[in-house]
């Protein structure tokens, strides 16, 4: 089967510059270093290859210091159904220097940074990476043991004029016919893993002095012989600032007085020894309530009470249900002298699951949490509860009037910082549905808005999951819960 099925991958069909492959020379294209035509050879347009060769060689050398900006278009496709599953466009900025590198992707509508990375060559010649710590809103420098010149060697400077192949019908556009060098150059420039993605085309435009444009198409197929799913990444870039580029800096989020107030409220929650978290699900107009539960957290005994009821059935020897009763779950770190506050794992104990009869409070099931759920890593009490310090106050946008929302890049941090396990499953892929409301000096509530289908009518309804915090240091666990695992 053709690698790019007809009529399905519209992005490739609309945006590829030519029909020739970067690795397979065709009769419609010619290498840049074609020997110069001589009088009487029958050529009506002699190729001044020596002049072009010199200019291209100089342009290659100029790729040691440049910037490029443009867009990254992403698409995911169901090839069997002929539909687009997902698509997005991001603004991109890339700065390449001899001793520094910067890359960012920004949301097209808001221009918010989705992700960014900055690498530097430190005074010892080592690779240094600058990152923004979401817990402090401070830019930190992480030093590698590897040399910058080795890790960040610029493969563009390894190009030769003979590596360029002219693209038919596209004036001054070239492909690179050295496949290995293409993979290295694309990985170096974009950071995308070319061992997992195929570079379908790397096209570069020469304006007579420099390479001023690039178009890079990368593809992934679940099965290259009979593909049913595909992803595409298309970079469309403008190059400039040759020899004058500077690497953009990673910058902290702006901090307002409101952010400082929010930080104080988050610190207050983080310092609580116990608290109650109320979680409700309502229609967005507040007229219908679908659920309303109180989660109990005790940070000193590492106990988390999940009040959401579920039904336990009792079966006879024939596998028939003879009775049933309602239960709820308690998760508790159990062991001797438990301390989860440090990197020492010898005194962490284990996270246990206890299912209790909701009426009699009798324990009907006990299990090791990680064994029961078959997790690949060791979950602990802190895996289930809000980690309030995970995102500092400045990591939320100040919307004014005591309202805040996470940035797109901090949404996942905010989710883990504010919501306990099981309280909601309505997190958004668009990352624009969370709002934090403050009342005075405290967080009044956090809301997630989303759409769902009504159980009976299948009509779309607008819902909101709201959580609030209370009982700081005054939430007391009943004895039948506090004594579990003793």
Image (spheres, helix red, strand yellow):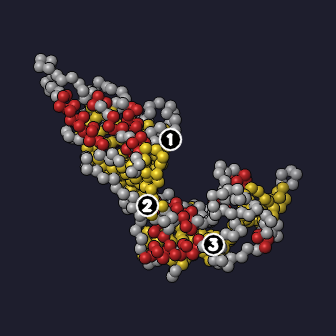
Side of 219 where 29 appears, left or right: left
Q: Residue furthest bottom?
A: 440
Along the horizontal axis of the image, is 79 left or right of 31? right
Q: What's the mark number on residue 229?
A: 1
**Which mark is first along the chain, 3 or 1?**
1
- Residue sitting farthest toward the top: 40
Toward the right, the furthest residue is: 317
Q: Is residue 229 above or below residue 122?
A: above
The kind of secondary structure element at disc 2 is: strand
- Label 3 vs 2, first from the N-terminus: 2
Residue drawn at point x = 40 percent, y = 36 percent: 183
Residue 289 horizontal/vertical position (percent): 61, 72
- Residue ranking furthest to the left: 39
Residue 177: where, in percent of width, then height? 34, 30
SS under mark 3: strand
Mark-to-mark CA distance, 1 and 2: 39 Å
Label 1 close to label 3 by CB (< 8 Å): no
Camera-nearest residue between 304 and 168: 304
Front label number (1 vs 2): 2
Residue drawn at the location 30% of the way across and 31% of the way down: 160
The residue carrying mark 3 is 277
Asked whether residue 250 is in view, the answer is: yes
Residue at image position (43%, 47%) is 126
Q: CA distance from mark 1 to mark 3?
A: 41 Å
- Labels 3 & 2 near each other (Cβ < 8 A): no
Q: Which mark lies nearer to you, 3 or 2?
A: 2
């Amino acid at each position: 089967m053709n690698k790019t099925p007809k009529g399905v991958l519209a992005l490739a069909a609309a945006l590829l510059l030519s029909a020739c492959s970067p690795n397979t020379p065709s009769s419609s294209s010619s290498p840049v270093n074609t020997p110069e035509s001589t009088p009487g050879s029958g050529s009506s347009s002699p190729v001044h290859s020596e002049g072009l060769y010199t200019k291209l060689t100089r342009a290659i050398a100029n790729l040691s210091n440049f910037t490029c900006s443009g867009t990254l278009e992403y698409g995911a496709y169901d090839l069997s159904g002929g539909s687009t599953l997902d698509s997005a466009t991001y603004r991109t900025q890339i700065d390449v220097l001899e001793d520094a590198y910067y890359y960012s992707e920004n949301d097209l509508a808001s221009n918010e940074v989705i992700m960014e990375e900055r690498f530097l060559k430190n005074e010892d010649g080592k690779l240094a990476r600058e990152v923004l710590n979401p817990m402090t809103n401070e830019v930190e420098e992480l030093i590698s043991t590897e040399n910058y010149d080795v890790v960040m060697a610029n493969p563009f400077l390894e190009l030769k004029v003979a590596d360029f192949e002219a693209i038919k019908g596209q004036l001054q556009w070239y492909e690179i016919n050295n496949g290995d060098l293409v993979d290295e150059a694309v990985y170096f420039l974009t950071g995308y893993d070319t061992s997992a993605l195929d570079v379908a085309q790397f096209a570069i435009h020469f304006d007579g002095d420099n390479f001023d444009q690039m178009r890079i198409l990368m593809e992934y197929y679940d099965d290259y012989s009979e593909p049913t799913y595909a992803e595409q990444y298309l970079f469309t870039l403008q190059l400039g600032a040759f020899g004058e580029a500077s690497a953009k800096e990673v910058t902290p989020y702006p901090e307002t007085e409101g952010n400082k107030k929010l930080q104080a409220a988050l610190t207050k929650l983080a310092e609580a020894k116990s608290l109650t978290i109320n979680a409700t699900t309502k229609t967005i107009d507040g007229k219908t309530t679908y659920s309303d539960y109180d989660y109990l957290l005790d940070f000193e005994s590492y106990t988390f009470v999940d009040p959401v009821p579920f039904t336990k059935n009792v079966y006879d020897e024939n596998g028939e249900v003879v009775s049933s009763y309602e239960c709820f779950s308690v998760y508790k770190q159990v062991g001797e002298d438990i301390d989860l506050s440090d990197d020492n794992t010898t005194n962490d104990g284990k996270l246990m699951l206890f299912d209790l009869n909701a009426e009699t409070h009798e324990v009907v099931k006990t299990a090791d949490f990680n064994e029961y759920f078959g997790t690949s890593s060791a979950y602990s009490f802190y895996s289930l509860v809000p980690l309030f310090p995970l995102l500092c106050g400045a990591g939320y946008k100040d919307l004014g009037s005591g309202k805040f929302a996470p940035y797109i890049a901090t949404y996942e941090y905010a989710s883990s910082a504010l919501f306990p396990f099981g309280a909601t499953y309505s997190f958004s892929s668009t990352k624009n549905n969370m709002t934090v409301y403050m009342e005075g000096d405290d967080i009044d509530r956090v809301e997630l808005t989303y759409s769902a289908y009504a159980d009976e009518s299948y009509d779309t309804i607008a819902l909101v999951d709201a959580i609030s915090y209370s009982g700081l240091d005054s939430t007391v666990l009943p004895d039948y819960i506090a004594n579990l695992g003793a």
